[in-house]
């Protein structure tokens, strides 16, 4: 054992036993993982709290102790707020650039530049056309797709006016945004402006800076992210419930394993198609494999799970663990949340790490710049390479655990499910919230962070909320975590409070609904706007008995999602590692009280899951009281025994 590995206890890093099992393998082979590195590296407390300003070469200035101003005179409030705005801008750029790429793909398909690709959901395409001000009637499908793609792309470069999707918001919210001057004008413009206003010597007022963060994030939530979701549904199909399973046990002992990891579904969907071609299956058999198995990691996992039933092998913290099985012939990655350490781990095995995006050369991967006009050919080449690599497989060690799940609850499907195909509607949801059977709705979203115990926050929060009759929707890595721990099945009803279970049974839904990837948090915005429009619960997203929670966040993208949720009127709670603006009490308080006053939403950081649940229920109950629909409800308190039972 090296000096660094001393004191690292593999059993304490996760409540998922597959993690300890695979970390045992890592330890035996002396391979470092993210868990080990998190244990070796102490986070910099100055940076963590947002107290370090490195915007210019007069610094970096660390505003700690008696140092309350930087060389330029910037205060702790300014520095913390600027750092936060930059994180939000980075997150917004990632989700929005993803949306741009989907629009470019649609344009290439419409013009026939991408061979052999179709529009999977023509009904949704017509609806999206309507949102973008295009008359769909009488147009052939590829002409319409071309027009929709052009209109979507124009949203990125628009300089003035308002993003088209702002009109999908409740009227009251639109007016509020106009009154504060935070309506997003163009997607790229808001990201650029956020970077500009945080330049040294530019915006110095923390409130104005944070309004900049709101505007920039809205350009993603009601712009880039929402376009990504909508256009992906048009191209690859709008999700509806699908059965699958999750965790490392989905990796096959006898088949060629290909793992798709990252965020953009175009190439991944073609790789999935290629693995199902008889010629490829024959090729796999010719090298001694029983067939080809495909599984996912991170948000590509969510995208392909919801549409093609591909099982997720794990969330973000499982990427290296999957390779440690020794059974992965190819790990195919594109952009976002791909650890550089993945290259190092792969180098100890036969696993080919293949990076496919021109934007991201990953680790020591084989970097294949995929000809964007011939992705099907690239997909087949990748599958062939993986098959050929099967012969190089050495010893394998695959955990047995995987849990069944149901995923794919798009906004459209939730409407059909509740109101029927002819009269799709959210009315039954609103009615059950009003009559108190459903106490409120919580979105449990976001990442997994090795600074905490993997999965503990998400599982505790989800279990306690449903026990308290709160309907839960999940996205991103939190959705995969929920799946790994068996929380995405109708049987989860047994853990739900009596009245929530009653509703779930009547409607035929699980109490925890998988609604998608991280860009699909935009689906939650659509649901909330629809709930407000349906009636009986006020006329805005603000004031709904709904809370968004990210118990184990790590990414700048998570902060951006939090900020657009606040701007949209939602209360947001982040768990785990604490506040990135902790250096300024003023900013911390402003994000709670100032934002509530201004936007009707707030962002608070509460580390422990029990505290998150209490705060969530308090916020939900306060909203119910304000709506005058409060019925007495008792809090189910989890004791230590119940908590212990939460592990798989
Ligand atoms: Ni979201 Fe998806 Fe996972 Fe977090 Fe990363 S994969 S975009 S950022 S870690 S949920």
Image (cartoon, helix red, strand yellow):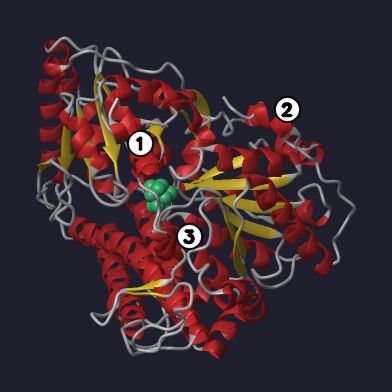
* Horizontal and vertical percent position of residue 566: 57, 69
| Disc number placed over residue 522 in the picture, else none | 3
Asked if the residue at tag 2 contacts the one at tag 1, i.e. Cβ–Cβ closer than 8 Å, the answer is: no
271 displayed left or right of 311: left
Residue 593 placement (x, y as % from top left): 66, 75
Q: Residue at horizontal 58%, vertical 85%?
A: 175
Residue identified by numbered label 1 = 36
Instruction: Give the crowd class for mark 1: few <14, some 14-19, many >=20 residues within 10 Å.
Output: many
Farthest top residue?
Answer: 288
**Is disc 3 placed on a helix, strand or loop?**
helix
Mark 1 residue's CB less than 8 Å from ligand 1: no
| As drawn, 212 above or below 535 | below
Residue drawn at the location 73% of the way across and 56% of the way down: 430
**Front-lying residue, 181 or 163:** 181
Quarter-of-image position of residue 310: top left
Q: Which residue is mark 2?
A: 641
Q: Is residue 637 left or right of residue 526?
A: right
Cβ–Cβ below 8 Å for labels 3 and 2?
A: no
Q: Earlier in the sequence, mark 1 or mark 3?
A: 1
Circle 1: element type: helix
Of the residues under marks 3 and 2, which one precedes in the sequence?
3
> Mark 1 and mark 2: span between their CA atoms?
29 Å
Is residue 540 found left or right of 271 in the rendered image?
A: right
Disc nearest the viewer among 1 and 3: 1
């Amino acid at each position: 054992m090296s000096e660094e590995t001393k004191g690292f206890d593999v059993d304490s890093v996760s409540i998922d036993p597959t993690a300890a099992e695979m970390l045992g393998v890592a330890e035996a082979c002396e391979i470092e993982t993210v868990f080990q590195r998190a244990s070796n590296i102490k986070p910099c407390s100055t940076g963590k709290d947002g107290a370090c300003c490195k915007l210019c070469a007069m610094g970096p200035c660390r505003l700690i102790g008696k140092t309350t101003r930087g060389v330029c005179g910037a205060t702790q409030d300014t520095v913390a707020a600027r750092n936060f705005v930059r994180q939000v801008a980075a997150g917004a750029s990632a989700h929005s650039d993803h949306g741009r790429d989907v629009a470019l793909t649609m344009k290439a398909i419409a013009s026939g530049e991408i061979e052999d690709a179709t529009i999977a959901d023509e009904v949704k395409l017509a609806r999206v056309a309507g949102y973008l001000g295009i008359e769909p009637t009488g147009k052939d499908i590829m002409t319409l797709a071309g027009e929709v793609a052009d209109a979507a792309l124009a949203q990125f470069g628009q300089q003035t006016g308002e993003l088209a999707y702002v009109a999908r918001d409740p009227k009251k919210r639109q007016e509020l945004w106009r009154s504060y001057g935070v309506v997003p004008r163009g997607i790229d413009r808001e990201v650029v402006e956020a970077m500009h206003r945080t330049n040294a010597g530019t915006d110095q007022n923390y409130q104005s800076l944070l309004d900049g963060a709101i505007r920039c994030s809205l350009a993603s939530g009601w712009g880039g992210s929402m376009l990504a979701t909508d256009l992906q549904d048009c191209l690859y199909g709008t999700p509806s419930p699908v059965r699958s399973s999750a965790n490392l046990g989905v990796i096959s002992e006898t088949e060629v394993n290909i793992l798709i990891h990252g965020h953009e579904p175009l190439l991944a969907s073609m790789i999935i198609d290629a693995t199902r071609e008889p010629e490829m299956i024959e090729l796999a058999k010719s090298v001694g494999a029983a067939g080809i198995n495909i599984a996912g990691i991170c948000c590509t996992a969510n995208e392909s799970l919801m549409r093609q039933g591909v099982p997720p092998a794990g969330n973000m913290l499982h990427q290296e663990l999957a390779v440690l099985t020794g059974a992965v012939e190819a790990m195919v990655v594109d952009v976002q949340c791909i650890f550089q350490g993945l290259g190092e781990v792969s180098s100890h095995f036969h696993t080919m790490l293949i990076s496919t995006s021109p934007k991201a050369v990953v680790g020591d991967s084989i970097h294949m710049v995929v000809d964007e006009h011939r992705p099907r050919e690239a997909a087949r080449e990748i599958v062939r390479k993986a098959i050929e690599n099967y012969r190089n497989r050495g010893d394998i060690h695959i955990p047995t655990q995987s849990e069944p799940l149901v995923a794919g609850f798009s906004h459209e499907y939730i409407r059909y499910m509740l109101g029927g195909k002819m009269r799709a509607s959210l009315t039954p949801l609103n009615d059950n919230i009003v009559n108190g059977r459903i106490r409120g709705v919580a979105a449990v979203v976001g990442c997994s962070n090795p600074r905490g115990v993997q999965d503990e926050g998400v599982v505790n929060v989800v279990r306690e909320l449903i026990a308290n009759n709160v309907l839960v929707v999940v996205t991103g890595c939190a959705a995969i975590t929920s799946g790994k721990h068996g929380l995405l099945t109708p049987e989860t009803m047994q853990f739900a409070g009596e009245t929530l279970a009653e509703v779930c049974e009547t409607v035929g839904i699980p109490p925890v609904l998988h609604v998608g990837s991280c860009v699909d948090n935009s689906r939650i915005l659509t649901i909330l706007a629809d709930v407000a429009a349906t009636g009986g619960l006020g006329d805005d997203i603000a004031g709904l008995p709904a809370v968004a929670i990210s118990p184990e966040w790590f990414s700048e993208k998570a902060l951006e999602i939090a900020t657009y949720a606040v701007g949209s009127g939602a209360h947001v709670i982040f768990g785990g590692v604490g506040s990135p603006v902790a250096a300024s009490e003023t900013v911390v308080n402003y994000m709670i009280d100032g934002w509530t006053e201004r936007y009707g939403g707030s962002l608070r950081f509460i580390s422990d899951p029990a505290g998150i649940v209490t705060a969530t229920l308090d916020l939900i109950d306060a909203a119910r009281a304000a709506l005058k629909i409060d019925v007495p409800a008792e809090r189910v308190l989890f004791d230590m025994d119940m908590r212990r039972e939460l592990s798989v």
